[in-house]
Image: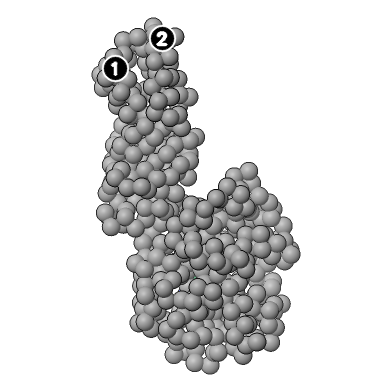
Amino acid sequence: MKTAIIGGGAAGFFLAVNLKEMMPEMEVTIFERAQRVLTKVEVSGGGRCNCTNSFEDVTDLRMVYPRGHRLMKRLFNVFDYQSAFAWFEHHGVPLITQDNQCVFPAAQDSHAIINCFLTLARRHQVQICLGRKIQSLDALQDYDFIAVTTGGSPKGEGLRWLADLGHEIEQPVPSLFTFQVADKSLTALMGTVVGQTTVMIPGTKLHASGPLLITHWGMSGPAILKLSSYAARLLAEKEYKLPVSVRWTTARDSDIENILHETMRVHSSKQLPTFNPFGLPQRLWAFLMTRSLADRWEVRWHELGKKDVNRIVNILCNDTYQISGRGTFKDEFVTCGGISLKSVNPSTLESKLVPRLFFAGEVLDVDGVTGGFNFQAAWTTAYTVASAIVSKLS
Ligand SMILES: Cc1cc2nc3c(=O)[nH]c(=O)nc-3n(C[C@H](O)[C@H](O)[C@H](O)COP(=O)(O)OP(=O)(O)OC[C@H]3O[C@@H](n4cnc5c(N)ncnc54)[C@H](O)[C@@H]3O)c2cc1C
């Protein structure tokens, strides 16, 4: 029995070594178009590979898998993050979980994972054919099973041959990117970090919370990356030209008003920009006061009128900027879209159109936010395919 795996990335290797461990007599060949394998694993997580997450803060998989949360829930019954954690440790890669729930190799080096895969592939005699771009099944007639693990294809060209076989394709668009904002007065605050914000696309329910970083091109940080993932499709449709609204504080609207009134009473003679009751970075606070009160921004607290208070509340809760384009995020970038989940059996990931053809990894319409969720999807889907191939033979 022979299995061909198209793509020598995270999902391809995980599938190959698991299939060999489950069924040593299976001949497994990985076809990789490039001259090197596992290149994304190498650069992932800033070279440290954030290979999974403890999921401790995840109460609903929709939070971390904007596409594919139902499929992941189903497949986690068989191979979840705990299984992945145990798998790596069992195969000689000790892991550590950071305070933010992200899991990395204890060696803090993605080569720990790469070496593990390469050693196991060698031990199990997995054939690796480099420089072999596969875009049809014709060259693989000799194989009993074929698994496509070609990863994301943001421009969609890598999916055309799979569409020609009858698979439905969810239009691929980028996910996990930063926002360009043309407003120079905001970008002048580059380097400013606000620990807890909520960012949203006005007029929609799309929102995300977390730290926000002001950069020289616009906005970045976990809150923005998450929003870019939730709103990936809408942003692409609108050509990355949409408003984004920032809530700069976690205080409730009514509490914000109370804090402002209290400050007006207790610190009445202080100038507005010099006394900041919300713990925001001082430069940002002064900037927000100019946005609220224009040239009156240096007034003293006791000089504020009712309308001024309303304007300040509004800016703190709903400060809107125009997104002017998409920036890239240097550490992570994934594709939203790919092979539609309607075209695969959700328990085995076998194609509903071509028997014995399977899909795993980012080629599927499954993608997650930052934090190790994308690799976890690759491990889970690859393990599912390995098990499904073995069950077909038993
Ligand atoms: C810079 C960066 C950092 C990242 N960091 C993290 C992180 O820390 N944590 C996390 O969870 N996720 C991270 N990701 C996302 C993660 O890398 C991917 O989700 C994951 O690699 C997907 O695995 P895959 O095997 O499906 O695809 P890939 O790892 O992309 O592998 C696909 C392979 O298929 C090959 N291929 C494509 N087409 C063909 C073809 N026609 N014939 C033959 N070979 C083909 C490609 O050359 C490639 O080697 C990061 C992504 C990037 C770009």
* Label at residue 265: 2
Instruction: Tell me: residue 392, above or below residue 155.
Output: below
Residue closer to the observer: 247 or 135: 247
Residue closer to the observer: 85 or 258: 258
Marks 2,1: beta carbons within 8 A: no
Residue that mark 1 sits on: 306
- Amino acid under label 2? Arg
Q: Where residue 161 appears, x then y in whole percent?
A: 38, 80
Residue 236 position by quadrant: bottom left
The local secondary structure at tag 2 comes to: helix
The local secondary structure at tag 1 comes to: helix
Q: Where residue 392 appears, x then y in whole percent?
A: 59, 85
The yes-or-no answer for disc 1 within 8 Å of ligand 1 is no
Q: Residue at x 69, y 55 (%)?
A: 95
Q: Is residue 35 visible?
A: no
Q: Residue at x 65, y 71 (%)?
A: 118
